[in-house]
Image: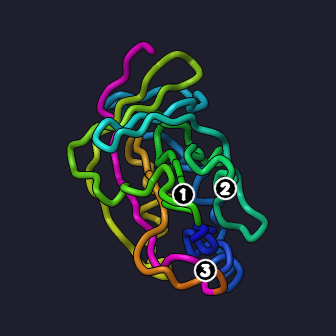
């Protein structure tokens, strides 16, 4: 089945239109960054995502907001690529860098099909255009009903450099009912960086 990501975050059509919720506002970040007690990188576009535990090595393309106000996703013809939300921090900056991907299509699994299988302490590497590799460690992997996604926790945590990987999961509700019922979210923190 095609993973349409309609209502990926319940922000675009749900919270966005119903309450005037501004997704873009969450990604503006804190007025002042916290003290640098851990690695912090300058802005740089992500180019490649590596998740050794899942056998993922894939290019990263930029995605923005979709017409309905939700975060866009890679086109289905590029379903085995990840999409970085370019309206937020880049991986390694203060705040939650967001990378999304499809779980599947009508023809089979996609890049984030097994995202729910990730475990705490597993490593995620993001190669960046400045030649650095941002290294993240998984803190938790959680599943949320699309209507109950903890918006501020996912998008608004500017306490340190972090990464959110997101895809759809749970029961398939059908194309007309928004695709899958849930969102799978990997929460990870920057722990190191190295030259690419």
Residue placed at 45% from the left, 53% from the top? 112
Q: Quadrant location of the N terminus?
A: bottom right
Direction from residue 187 to residue 95 in the image, left or right: right
Residue placed at 67% from the left, 58% from the top? 72
Q: Which residue is mark 1?
A: 102
Image quarter of residue 135: top left
Q: Is residue 33 above or below residue 112?
A: above
Q: Quadrant location of the C terminus?
A: top left
Please provide the residue range marked out in magenta.
177-196
Residue placed at 36% from the left, 56% from the top? 114
Instruction: Residue 178: give its label.
Output: 3
Instruction: Residue 76: give its label.
Output: 2
Marks 1 and 2 in Cβ contact (< 8 Å)? yes
Q: Sequence order check: which comes first, mark 3 or mark 1?
A: 1
Q: Residue 7: where, in percent of width, then height?
A: 60, 74
Q: Residue 122: where, in percent of width, then height?
A: 24, 42
Scheme of image coloration: rainbow
């Amino acid at each position: 089945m095609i993973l349409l990501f309609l209502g990926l975050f319940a922000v675009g059509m749900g919270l966005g239109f119903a309450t005037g919720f501004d997704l873009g506002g969450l990604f503006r970040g804190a007025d002042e960054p916290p003290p640098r007690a851990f690695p912090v990188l300058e802005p740089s576009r992500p180019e490649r995502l590596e998740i050794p535990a899942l056998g993922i090595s894939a290019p990263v393309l930029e995605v923005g907001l979709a017409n309905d106000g939700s975060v866009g996703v890679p086109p289905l013809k590029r379903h085995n690529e990840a999409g970085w939300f370019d309206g937020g921090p880049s991986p390694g900056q203060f705040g939650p860098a967001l990378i999304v991907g499809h779980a599947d299509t009508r023809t089979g699994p996609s890049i984030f099909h097994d995202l729910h299988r990730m475990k705490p302490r597993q490593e995620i590497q993001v190669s960046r255009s400045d030649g650095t590799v941002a290294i993240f460690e998984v803190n938790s992997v959680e599943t949320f009903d699309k209507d109950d996604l903890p918006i501020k926790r996912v998008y608004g945590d500017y306490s340190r450099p972090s990464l959110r990987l997101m895809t759809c999961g749970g029961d398939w509700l059908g194309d007309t009912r928004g695709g899958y019922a849930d969102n799978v979210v990997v929460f990870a923190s920057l722990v190191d960086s190295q030259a690419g």
